[in-house]
Amino acid sequence: MPLPEPLRHRAGRRAGVRVGGHTIGTGAFTVIAGPCAVESEDQLLTTAMGVADAGAHVLRGGAFKPRTSPHSFQGMGRAGLDLLAAARAATGIPVVTELVDVRDVDRVCEVADMLQIGARSMQNVPLLREAARSGRPVLLKRNPGATVAELLSAADYLLAEGNEQVVLCERGIRTFEGSTRYTLDISAVPVIRERTHLPVIVDPSHAAGRAALVGTLAQAAVAAGADGIMVEVHVAPADALSDGPQSILLDDFPDFLAALSPFIAAAGRHHASPPHVLA
Ligand code: PEP
Ligand code: MN
């Protein structure tokens, strides 16, 4: 069956994507924060409480970690999902976590308020279809080797299943530049806003690869018109099992947000109260 004209071409009307009690994409600036990976009860609960207290709207954390090397930590799997459920209950803020395998969709949906499709999976069509059919909102990350047009086509697979709760994420692309882990394609933000009604957020952590740069890239994201950011935060980055070098120290997270706040105001946005305090 041919697709109808892509739903994304709805000029002029920005979509709001509802994640738990929070809406991404309509005025308020969204902060998604948490560890790269769920590592232990103590690590996750401490980080979750810390980021929620500081004002994060959504908790992130991977239970399934597809890594570049098979010898790296692959995540806690289903045990990690249980810890995410505990963190969600303890903080009251919604959770986004990555869906890697179609066979896990039901189990992940028991815990996740939003499904993350990782950069490596952006063009995994069966995974996109299953994620969309779950009815959960989907956070679709751009593959570092994909064009914006390819990202939007991947989003069309979600929309074509009747799920319009889609948020796009720029997380850095592969270039010849070696001073950062990837190159944050800041232009992608206004380009995506031009071409689609879907919200767009920026992940400065994976783009930078180093915590020292994350604040500046986050500020640039706000200025470029992003609807939010997703940042990695760890209670002890030096001990992290994945992506420690790019993770903001939990104790530094309130200052990170305070430094972002004038940029949010200058962009005509506001920092909404986290959903748990509205309940
Ligand atoms: C992540 O968010 O931890 C992650 C694995 O990111 P990406 O899919 O963008 O590499
Ligand atoms: Mn990571």
Image: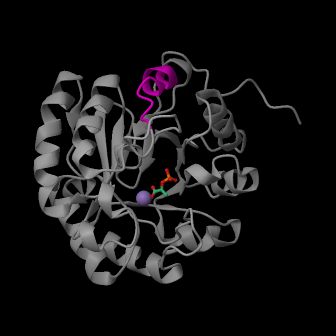
Q: Please, which residue is most extreme toward the right here?
A: 1
The image shows residue 62 at horizontal and vertical percentages of 45, 66
* Quarter occupied by the C terminus: bottom left
Question: Which image quadrant is residue 276 in?
Answer: bottom left
Q: Position of residue 226 (x, y in %)?
A: 36, 31
On-image quarter of the N terminus:
top right
Number of residue marks: 0
- Magenta residues, as a range? 183-193
> In this view of the protein, can residue 58 be seen by the observer?
no
Is 67 on the left or on the right of 45, as rendered?
right
Q: Please, is residue 251 above or below residue 231 in the view?
A: below
Q: Is residue 94 magenta?
A: no
Residue 185 located within the stretch drawn in magenta: yes
Q: Nearer the viewer, residue 192 or 188?
A: 188
Q: Is residue 14 above or below residue 210?
A: above
On the picture, is 160 further left or further right than 247? right
Q: Residue at x 22, y 47 (%)?
A: 212
Residue 102, x across and y down, in percent = 69, 65
Residue at (47, 41) in percent of width and height: 169
Q: Is residue 251 above or below residue 40?
A: above
Q: Is residue 101 visible?
A: yes
Q: Is residue 36 found left or right of 78 in the rendered image? A: left
Question: What residue is shown at x 44% (from left), y 21% (from top)?
Answer: 190
Q: Residue at x 52, y 50 (%)?
A: 137
The one of 217 and 6 positioned closer to us in this rendering: 217
* Of residues 137 and 201, the one drawn nearer to the viewer in this rendering: 201
Q: Position of residue 37 (x, y in %)?
A: 41, 68
Q: Quadrant of ligand 2?
A: bottom left
Asked which colour scheme the image uses, the reply is: one colour
